[in-house]
Image (tube, rainbow, N blue to C red):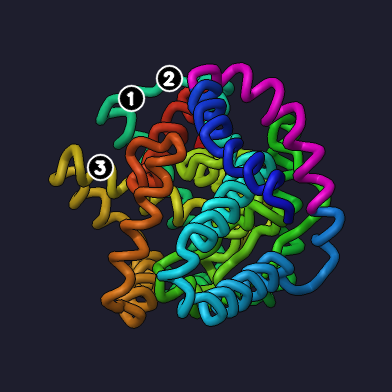
Amino acid sequence: MTKRTKILIALSFPIQFFLIKFLSYYPEFVETYYSNGLYPYISKLFRIVFGWIPFSIGDVFYTIAGILIIRYIYKNYRLVRTEYKRILIDIYITITVAYFAFHLLWGMNYYRLPLYKSLELDRKYSTEQLVDFTERVIAKANATQFKITQNDTVKVEVPYATSEIFEKTMNGYENFSVKQPRFQFTNESLKTSIYSGFLTIMGFSGYINPFTNEAQVNYKIPVYKFAVTASHEKAHQIGYSAENEANFIGCMAALHNDDIYFKYGAYNFMTWHCLREVYNRDKDEYERLKATINPGIQKNYDEVRAFWNSHKNPLKPMFKFTFDQFLKANNQSKGILSYSYVVSLLVNYDKKHTIVP
């Protein structure tokens, strides 16, 4: 790379930064010209190119990048004192290129129009509305769990292989997009991550690779969680970066799936999130509602809790904090807490479209 090229790249970073901050004040523009303009072509192209490959190309790229970083450190650590300017410039240029690629290929979706505005939903809801919705969700979760197991004390065991679950996720999006065409999905690119062990240490169930548009699922998590997790990551693929929005879309896709295990995953997901919100508002109502849940459903919750408890480690809080700061830097002011704001979308969407009759 020539010196002139390096200078041009270096000078582009502040321009990029201020341009993105400027566009963040115009979500309608981002929604129209990026999220519904340029991004769908980028996303589809990457899913066509990488989707057919059975393993994660993005994880391979990260591995190569890690090796190159280690190699660079090894070759240059003795030269830090004498060539520190060159080294700093190299690091700065690498960050600048990655920053540009991240926002061009996926990251600008953080600044699109909020989903509640696109769907014309309210943002607020009363405790009475929350409790009513939660009661109906629990009734559906109980009925679905019993239909699968024929015993309200038995936890649900999903009988599918990972590849079968991945194939079935498309059905939910096909059905949901009949009602909401904005959530149409084509060209599958859904995979387990070769870094699932590392994701478990960090406390994550999956992630979207912003540079290859591959949806990654942590294959170590309890299998009954795969349906909603995979559907959540696919929501990121179609351009919904905010975690509460991806939670909502993923849950709705699983709920609209013809497969009963996907429906159970959705009801299970909604019950857990809604109960948490009820707890925050009215602890007596929380205790009353919790007591109505089938023991089999509680055993599924216990299964997840036991899984994450068995992988507790001193690094997990650091990873959570880092991700929290990443979300806050990308237009999600509540950081990692934004995952739980899915309840607002669920309750208000139900008020308008009746999710659970």
Please determine whether, in this image, residue 225 is positioned above or below residue 71: above
Separation of marks 3 and 1 at Cα, in angstroms: 12 Å
Q: Residues within 10 Å of mark 2 (few under 14, many from 20)?
A: some
Please determine whether, in this image, residue 48 is positioned above or below residue 166: above
Separation of marks 1 and 2 at Cα, in angstroms: 8 Å
Q: Residue at x 72, y 28 (%)?
A: 36
Q: Main secondary structure of the magenta part?
A: helix
Q: Which residue is mark 2?
A: 122
Q: Residue furthest left?
A: 284
Residue 21 on image: x %, y %: 49, 27
1 and 2 marks in contact (CB < 8 Å)? yes
Residue 5 in the figure: left or right of residue 127 = right
Q: Sequence order check: which comes first, mark 3 or mark 1?
A: 1
Q: Does residue 175 appear anywhere in the picture?
A: yes
Q: Quadrant of residue 147?
A: bottom right
Please determine whether, in this image, residue 28 is positioned above or below residue 295: above
Q: Residues within 10 Å of mark 3 (few under 14, many from 20)?
A: many
Q: Which residue is mark 3?
A: 278
- Name the mark on residue 125: 1
Q: Amino acid at mark 1?
A: Tyr
The span shown in magenta is 25-46
Closest to the camera, between mark 3 and mark 2, is 2
- Judging depth in this view, the residue of 207 and 1 nearest the camera is 1
Q: Sequence order check: which comes first, mark 3 or mark 2?
A: 2
Q: Secondary structure at mark 3?
A: helix
Q: Residue at x 61, y 51 (%)?
A: 98
Q: Count the numbered circles shown.
A: 3
- Name the mark on residue 226: none
- Within the magenta stretch, is there residue 62? no
Q: Amino acid at mark 2?
A: Asp
